[in-house]
Image (cartoon, helix red, strand yellow):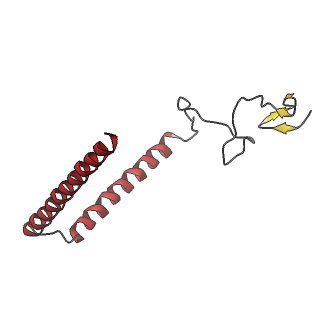
Amino acid sequence: MGEVWEGAVGAPSHGNRRVALTARAPDSKSGGWGFESLHACQIAVGTASEGERSQESMEFLGRVQQFFREVAAEFRRVNWPSRAEVARSTLVVLAVVVILALYLGAVDVALARIVGVILK
């Protein structure tokens, strides 16, 4: 006794198997040593003043605005295909889909007939 095991001091043992008092399986990072779980219903109570929270929210809004400005700049740099290129690509995709559907349908019918002959 007196050993620390799975975050519990003096964990009881049943035979050769020790039992954790916390009834919690260890996770891969902490191995159950001193890890305090934070449930979804728990809220961290901060000590930040109203001015600090206001400053943090303004910094967050600034970062969000910067992100959207960078997204818009990337969209302006994109080499968009013309309407004709999109139409040609769409026709190629549809043709390949039809050809593959016909091929798979023919294979399915052939295999169904082979299995039907074997089972008779």
Q: Nearer the viewer, residue 37 or 83?
A: 83
Where 79 falls versus 49 (above or below)? below
Relative image position of residue 79 (x, y in whole percent) = 20, 72
Residue 4 relative to residue 115: left or right = right
Choose between 52 and 18: the one closer to the eye: 18
For the C terminus, the quadrant is top left
Residue 91, percent across and down? Answer: 11, 63
In the visual, does 58 lie left or right of 80? right
* Residue closest to the far right: 1
Instruction: Please state which of residues 35 and 31 is positioned toward the viewer in this rendering.
Output: 31
Q: Position of residue 81 (x, y in %)?
A: 15, 69
Where residue 93 appears, as percent x and y from the top left, is: 17, 61
Residue drawn at the location 72% of the way across and 40% of the way down: 32
The residue drawn where x is 58% and y is 39% is 47
Quarter of image, res 7: top right
Q: Quadrant of residue 66?
A: bottom left
Q: Residue at x 36, y 54 (%)?
A: 64
Q: Residue furthest left?
A: 84
